[in-house]
C-alpha cells in the first residue's frame, strides 16, 4: 500500500497537546485517511491446518495465526491458547472453512457481547446495552422535542421511525451509536464509531501479537465521538472549532486542520489536561457504562463531580465494604494499601475512587491522584473558604459557572430536507432515499452564557439550536431557539465578577453594549433580529415576559428578577 506522508494536523512552531502528538505519529506512519489493515480472518488463504498443526496436539488456531499468543493484557491472558473462548469457531477442525464456522471476528460488538464478553462480565454488558451511549435516549427525545414531535414514544436510536426528527437522527446524528458493529481491524481516532466494548477497551492493533483489551482507555478512544456536538474532547485539549469566516480573523500560526477537514484554533486547555490527566482519571466505569439506572440524559449518568475530589465530605469507604461489581479494580490500586485503607467515593453513585490515595499524617488528610494511564501522582488541591468569597451568595452556581474558561459556540444553523437523492442511514447502514442539507455560520468560542438547569443550579449554556428547519411535510420553515447546559471541560482560573455581572453575553442577551440610565438598564445588540424578534445570538431580552428555553425540560435562561439582581451587584464591577 502506498503511504501518503501527512499529519493529522498541520502545525506551526508551537507544541501540541500530548493526545494530538500521538495522532500525528499514528497518521504519519499509516497515511492520511487510511490505515494499514491487519489481514482479516475471512481473507486468509485457503489451507489445510492438518499439516501446519501436525506437531500441535489436536490442532489449534495459532497453528495458522502464528504470533497471536503474545500481547494479551493480564486479565485476558487465559485466551492466548484458548481462542474460541472469545472468537468461538472450532479450534479442532482440520480445514479453514470448518474452523471458521460460527467465528466471531470482532468479539465485543454489542451484537455478540452478551455471548462473548458477557460470559465473564455479564452485569457490565447488560448495563452498557441499556446505557445512554447505546440507546441515545436523550438525543432522540431532545431532537423530537425541538421538532415539535411526540416524545412519549420509545426514545432509542434502535427504534427510530421516519418522522422528520427521526430521519435527521438517522442521517446526520447517529453515527456515534455504540451498537454499530466494528468491521475493520484498524483504528482511526478521528473517525471510529461504535464497536460496543471494543469502542473503549481496544487501543491498538500491533503488527506482531494479539490486540490487548485493557481498562487503560486512552483519550484517543473518546475522541471519535466526543469531538462532535459539544466538542468536549477538543475543548479539553485546548482546541476550538471555527468556521472559515472565523478563521480569517485568527493568526495563521495558531490554526490547525483536522484530517476530516475541520479547522481548529488553539485556546487554553483544561487544567486537568495540562496536568497530564486522561478522561478516565475523572470518569468512572459506573459513570460510563450505564450503571445509573433511569438516567434520561447523558449528564444524569455522569458519576463524577468536582467536589468528589476537591471537597469530599462523604464517609470514607474501607476495603471490607468494597462493591462487588468493582472487585476487579482492587488489583489495579496503584499504591500500597492497609486493612483499614480509606477511599473517597462519588456522591452520585457511591463509586470508590481507587486511584486517589488518602495520606493521613494525623493532622489532616492529603489527597493524591495516580493517573490511570501512567505518570507521576498529582496532589489534589482542596476547596478553601478563603479562595471562594461570597460562597453563600453563589451557592446556586456550579463549579463550571465560574471556572469554565471558554466554550465552543455556534449561533446559526439551517437544515433543509429534500426527497431527491439518497443519503447514508447510520442505523440501517446503507444509503436510503432523501437527504438532509446542513449549513452553519457564526461558529466561535468565548466565555459562555449562564442559565438555570432543571435542578435550579446556575451553569454554563451554549446555543444548542438556533436554527431554521425546512421539511416538505410542513407548510412553512420553522425557527427554533434553544440553549443547552454544558460542562465545557475547559476548567481554569475563575472568570472575573464583571464577566458575569456586567456581561450581556453571560446574561443571555447576546453581544452588544449594556449601559445604565438614571432609572433602568439598556442594551444595544450587535446582531440583527431573527424570525422570533430576538437578536440572532441572544437567548432572552431585557423585559422578556418568559425566560428562553433550554434543550432539556426545565432548563431556562435567567428571568427578569434574576437579571436585575445580577446587574444590581456593586457598581465597582462596571
Image (tube, rainbow, N blue to C red):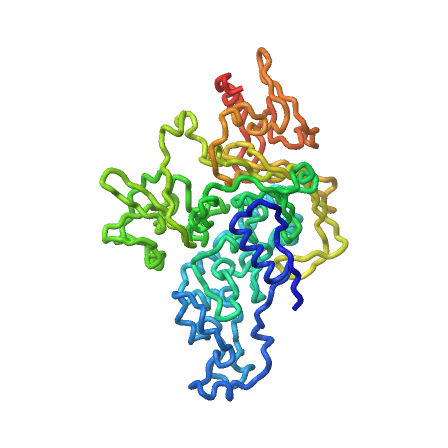
The reply to whether residue 62 is in sight is yes
User: Based on the displayed image, in which of its 4 quarters is residue 545 positioned?
Assistant: top right
Q: Position of residue 332 (x, y in %)?
A: 35, 57
Reply above or below: 445 against 295.
above
Q: Residue at x 60, y 58 (%)?
A: 27
Query: How many numbered callouts?
Result: 0
Q: Residue at x 60, y 27 (%)?
A: 509
Q: Position of residue 9 (x, y in %)?
A: 62, 51
Quadrant the C terminus occupies: top right
Residue most toward the front? Answer: 13
Residue most toward the top? Answer: 518
Q: Is 157 or 334 nearer to us in this picture?
A: 334
- Horizontally, residue 178 falls left or right of residue 390, namely right
The reply to whether residue 479 is in sight is no
Q: Position of residue 262 (x, y in %)?
A: 65, 48
Q: Position of residue 103 (x, y in %)?
A: 52, 74
Residue most toward the right? Answer: 420
Q: Residue at x 40, y 29 (%)?
A: 388
Q: Residue at x 52, y 51 (%)?
A: 19
Q: Is 445 or 396 nearer to us in this picture?
A: 445
Quadrant the N terminus occupies: bottom right
User: Based on the displayed image, in which of its 4 quarters is residue 160 positioned?
Assistant: bottom right
Q: Is 180 or 502 nearer to us in this picture?
A: 502
Reply above or below: 187 against 138.
below
Amino acid at each position: 500500500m502506498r503511504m501518503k506522508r501527512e499529519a493529522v494536523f498541520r502545525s506551526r512552531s508551537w507544541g501540541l497537546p500530548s493526545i494530538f502528538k500521538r495522532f500525528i505519529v499514528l497518521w504519519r506512519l499509516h497515511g492520511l485517511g487510511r490505515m494499514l489493515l491487519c489481514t482479516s480472518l475471512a481473507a486468509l488463504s485457503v489451507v489445510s491446518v492438518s499439516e501446519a498443526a501436525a506437531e500441535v496436539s489436536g490442532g489449534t488456531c495459532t497453528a495458522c495465526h502464528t504470533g497471536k499468543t503474545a500481547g494479551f493484557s493480564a486479565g485476558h491472558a487465559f485466551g492466548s491458547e484458548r481462542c474460541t473462548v472469545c472468537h468461538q469457531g472450532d479450534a479442532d477442525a482440520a480445514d479453514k472453512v470448518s474452523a471458521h464456522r460460527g467465528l466471531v471476528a470482532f468479539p465485543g460488538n454489542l451484537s455478540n457481547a452478551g455471548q462473548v464478553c458477557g460470559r465473564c462480565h455479564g452485569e457490565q454488558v447488560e448495563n452498557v446495552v441499556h446505557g445512554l451511549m447505546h440507546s441515545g435516549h436523550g438525543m432522540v427525545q431532545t431532537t423530537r422535542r425541538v421538532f415539535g414531535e411526540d416524545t412519549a414514544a420509545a426514545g432509542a436510536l434502535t427504534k427510530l421511525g421516519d418522522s422528520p426528527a427521526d430521519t435527521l437522527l438517522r442521517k446526520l446524528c447517529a453515527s456515534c451509536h455504540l451498537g454499530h458493529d466494528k468491521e475493520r481491524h484498524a483504528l482511526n481516532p478521528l473517525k471510529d464509531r461504535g464497536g460496543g466494548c471494543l469502542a473503549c477497551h481496544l487501543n491498538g492493533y500491533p503488527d506482531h501479537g494479539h490486540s490487548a483489551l485493557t481498562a487503560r482507555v486512552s483519550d484517543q478512544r473518546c475522541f471519535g465521538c466526543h469531538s462532535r456536538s459539544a466538542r468536549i474532547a477538543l475543548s479539553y485539549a485546548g482546541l476550538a472549532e471555527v468556521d472559515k469566516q472565523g478563521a480569517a480573523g485568527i493568526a495563521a500560526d495558531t490554526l490547525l486542520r483536522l484530517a476530516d477537514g475541520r479547522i481548529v484554533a488553539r485556546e487554553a486547555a483544561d487544567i486537568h489536561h495540562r496536568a497530564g490527566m486522561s478522561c478516565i482519571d475523572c470518569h468512572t466505569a459506573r459513570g460510563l457504562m450505564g450503571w445509573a439506572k433511569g438516567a434520561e440524559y447523558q449528564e444524569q449518568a455522569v458519576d463524577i463531580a468536582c467536589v468528589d475530589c476537591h471537597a469530599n465530605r462523604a464517609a470514607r469507604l474501607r476495603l471490607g465494604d468494597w462493591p462487588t461489581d468493582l472487585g476487579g479494580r482492587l488489583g489495579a490500586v496503584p499504591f500500597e494499601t492497609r486493612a483499614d485503607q480509606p477511599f473517597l467515593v462519588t456522591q452520585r453513585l457511591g463509586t470508590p475512587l481507587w486511584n486517589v490515595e488518602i495520606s493521613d499524617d494525623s493532622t489532616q488528610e492529603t489527597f493524591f491522584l495516580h493517573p490511570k494511564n501512567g505518570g507521576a501522582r498529582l496532589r489534589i488541591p482542596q476547596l478553601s473558604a478563603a479562595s471562594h468569597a461570597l460562597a453563600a451568595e453563589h451557592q446556586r452556581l456550579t463549579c463550571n459557572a465560574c471556572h469554565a474558561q471558554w466554550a465552543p459556540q455556534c449561533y446559526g444553523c439551517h437544515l433543509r430536507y429534500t426527497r431527491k437523492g439518497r443519503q447514508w442511514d447510520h442505523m440501517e447502514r446503507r444509503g436510503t432515499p432523501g437527504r438532509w442539507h446542513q449549513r452553519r455560520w457564526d461558529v466561535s468560542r468565548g466565555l459562555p452564557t449562564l442559565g438555570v438547569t432543571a435542578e435550579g443550579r446556575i451553569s454554563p449554556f451554549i446555543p444548542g439550536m438556533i436554527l431554521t428547519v425546512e421539511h416538505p411535510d410542513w407548510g412553512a420553515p420553522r425557527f427554533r431557539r434553544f440553549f443547552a447546559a454544558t460542562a465545557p471541560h475547559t476548567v481554569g482560573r475563575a472568570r472575573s465578577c464583571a464577566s458575569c455581572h456586567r456581561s450581556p453575553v453571560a446574561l443571555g442577551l447576546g453581544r452588544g453594549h449594556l449601559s445604565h440610565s438614571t432609572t433602568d438598564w439598556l442594551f444595544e445588540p450587535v446582531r440583527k433580529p431573527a424570525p422570533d424578534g430576538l437578536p440572532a445570538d441572544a437567548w432572552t431580552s431585557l423585559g422578556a415576559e418568559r425566560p428562553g428555553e433550554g434543550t432539556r425540560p426545565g432548563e431556562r435562561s435567567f428571568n427578569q428578577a434574576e437579571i436585575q439582581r445580577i446587574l444590581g451587584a456593586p457598581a465597582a464591577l462596571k
